[in-house]
């Protein structure tokens, strides 16, 4: 075997031209014939005992050659990769065979593992602004608390803003095939009549529906058509018209309680409205700064991407696209759809969907690769003792969510534990890497490194190895390595 040409293409694939001795292929042909003879019944011969010429006559030379190529590649390909010294992302492809040459020439295409060369990310500086809730934010929470604790009283009058109206509602699609017309079976629904200045873009069954009830009395009926907007959250209804029929069963007025100490005491362990306000401000501040932190980390990573050299083969992107589409299925199933019906509702093919999501997936992949490379350069690690505590917390949370029987089944499956540890390790490494990048962007990278190093030493000294929790004790070390595909933040239904 001799490599006569070795080039790397712009799409991060290695192209190899290799001369392989004819004797290698001839030997593989013999092995292929013996293998086929064991699988195909040949009259007059025991399995595997028919001579080459008989097998060739039975199945044809082409079938033997196809099998021989697979046999030869099983032997040659690993040696070929070892000789080049490259790290393949996945299996290579035999592109062409030229048997007219002596020795025969074979051309291979090998997808390479991703490579990331980070720029000088330690010099990235982006301003970070702490967030504080506005008075409007605080008052909106108070308003929501009052509405949640409103007193309901029957109203012998037409429906108006703020009322809860109990209705019988049904809907049918216009111009639908017989059997497919029913959109909503008749059922009772309580509907809060929203004020005119309230954002109703997420209102069900369509924005502004509740205000169609204003002026109706108990027992009154109403029918009307509605055409769903082109950007409706119900993709299969975009641009479609449905006929709605409703009947008012009851109208209740809502009397909001006063904002006083009594209300504060009814919603939690607060003595006064001032105590409740303090807690509201704290929670709003935490939420605003958590969101600001996530946005800030996205900005830092985006700048790192712009300043880095990132290479990966198309096979890797193709794999991630399929993974992304697979992750759509649970949400579709929850909406009563499968992939075929979803594609049909959008009048598109699977190829169309793959092209649509590819830019999103490519950006996510770049962020994942950059974050993981940063974790390696920053030597981000999770001390063993701390990792055990994090996994135990995950297990405790899981125990609260499932039955005792399901929990026992989970714990008795070694693969489940390994998967949990691996996934948790990945998430924790990513979290700590993003925290480091956050600190770097704010000019506090060295300070963060020193704090992390000191914390690691303290944890290791405080928790001897023999104190390992039993549930994690049996997990092999390799299960604690972060998985390559679990990179990136998990906060946008996928990763950041």
Image (spheres, rainbow, N blue to C red):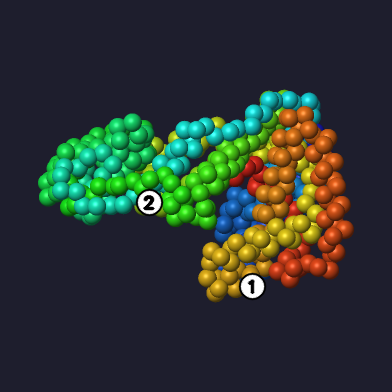
Marking on residue 209: none
Residue at the spot 78% in from the left edge and 67% down from the top edge: 468
How far is disc 1 from disc 2 in space, using C-alphas?
46 Å
Pinpoint residue 284: horizontal percent, then vertical percent.
55, 40
Q: Residue at x 85, y 47 (%)?
A: 454
Residue at screen point 58% across, 33% down:
132
Considering every residue shown, the one lying at the far left of the view is: 220
Q: Position of residue 6 (x, y in %)?
A: 78, 32
Of residue 326 and residue 127, the one placed in the foreground of this image is: 127
Q: Depth check: give the residue in front, 93 or 370.
A: 370
Give the quarter of the image for residue 18: top right
- Which residue in the protein does label 1 denote? 412
* Image-quadrant location for residue 422: bottom right
Give the camera-side residue of 454 and 402: 454
Q: Which residue is mark 2?
A: 149
Q: Is residue 86 above or below residue 402?
A: above
Residue 153, how many percent across, how many down?
24, 52
Quick check: 309 left or right of 405? right
Residue 68 in sight here: no
Establish if 405 lies above or below 74.
below
Residue found at x 22% / y 40%: 160
Q: Position of residue 110 (x, y in %)?
A: 70, 39
Which secondary structure lies at badge 1?
helix
**How packed is label 2: few (under 14 Cα within 10 Å), some, or many (20 or more)?**
some
Q: Nearer the viewer, mark 1 or mark 2?
A: 2
- Work out whether 224 lies above or below 386: above
Residue 467 visible to the viewer: yes
Instruction: Look at the numbered disc 2 and give the secondary structure of its residue.
Output: loop
Q: Is residue 451 left or right of residue 328?
A: right
Front residue of 298 and 64: 298
Is 19 above or below relative to 336?
above
């Amino acid at each position: 075997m001799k490599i006569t040409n070795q080039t790397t293409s712009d799409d991060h694939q290695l192209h190899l031209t290799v001369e392989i001795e004819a004797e290698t292929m001839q030997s593989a042909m013999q092995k292929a014939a013996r293998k086929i003879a064991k699988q195909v019944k040949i009259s007059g011969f025991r399995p595997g005992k028919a001579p080459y010429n008989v097998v060739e006559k039975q199945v044809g030379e082409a079938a033997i050659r196809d099998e021989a190529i697979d046999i030869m590649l099983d032997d040659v390909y690993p040696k070929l990769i070892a000789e080049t010294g490259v790290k393949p992302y996945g299996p290579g492809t035999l592109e062409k065979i030229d048997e007219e040459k002596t020795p025969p020439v074979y051309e291979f295409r090998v997808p390479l593992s991703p490579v990331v060369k980070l720029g000088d990310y330690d010099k990235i500086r982006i301003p970070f602004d702490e967030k504080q809730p506005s008075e409007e934010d605080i008052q909106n929470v108070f308003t929501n608390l009052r509405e949640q604790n409103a007193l309901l009283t029957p109203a012998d009058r037409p429906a108006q803003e703020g009322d809860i109206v109990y209705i019988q509602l049904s809907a049918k699609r216009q111009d639908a095939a017989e059997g497919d017309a029913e959109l909503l079976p008749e059922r009772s629904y309580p509907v809060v009549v929203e004020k005119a200045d309230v954002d109703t873009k997420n209102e069900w069954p369509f924005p502004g529906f509740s205000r169609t009830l204003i002026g109706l009395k108990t027992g009154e009926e109403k029918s009307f058509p509605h055409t769903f907007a082109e950007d409706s959250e119900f993709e299969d209804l975009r641009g479609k018209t449905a006929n709605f029929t409703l009947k008012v069963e009851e109208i209740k007025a809502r009397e909001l309680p006063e904002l006083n100490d009594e209300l504060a005491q009814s919603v939690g362990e607060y003595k006064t409205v001032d105590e409740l306000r303090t807690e509201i401000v704290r929670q709003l501040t935490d939420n605003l700064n958590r969101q600001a932190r996530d946005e800030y980390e996205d900005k830092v990573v985006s700048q790192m991407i712009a300043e880095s050299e990132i290479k990966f083969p198309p096979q890797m992107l193709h794999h991630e696209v399929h993974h992304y589409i697979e992750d759509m299925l649970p949400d579709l199933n929850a909406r009563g759809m499968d992939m075929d019906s979803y594609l049909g509702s959008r009048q598109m093919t699977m190829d169309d969907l793959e092209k649509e999501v590819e830019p999103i997936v490519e950006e996510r992949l770049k962020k994942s690769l950059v974050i993981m490379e940063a974790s390696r350069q920053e030597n981000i690690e999770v001390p063993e003792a701390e990792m055990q505590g994090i996994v135990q917390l995950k297990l405790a949370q899981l125990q609260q969510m499932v039955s005792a029987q399901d929990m026992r089944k989970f714990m008795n499956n070694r693969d489940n534990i390994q998967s949990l540890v691996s996934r948790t390790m990945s998430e924790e490494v990513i979290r700590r890497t993003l925290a480091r990048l956050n600190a770097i962007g704010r000019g506090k990278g060295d300070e963060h490194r020193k704090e992390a190093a000191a914390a690691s030493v303290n944890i290791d000294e405080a928790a001897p190895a023999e104190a390992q929790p039993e549930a994690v004790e049996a997990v092999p070390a390799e299960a604690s390595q972060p998985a390559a595909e679990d990179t990136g933040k998990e906060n946008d239904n996928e990763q950041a």
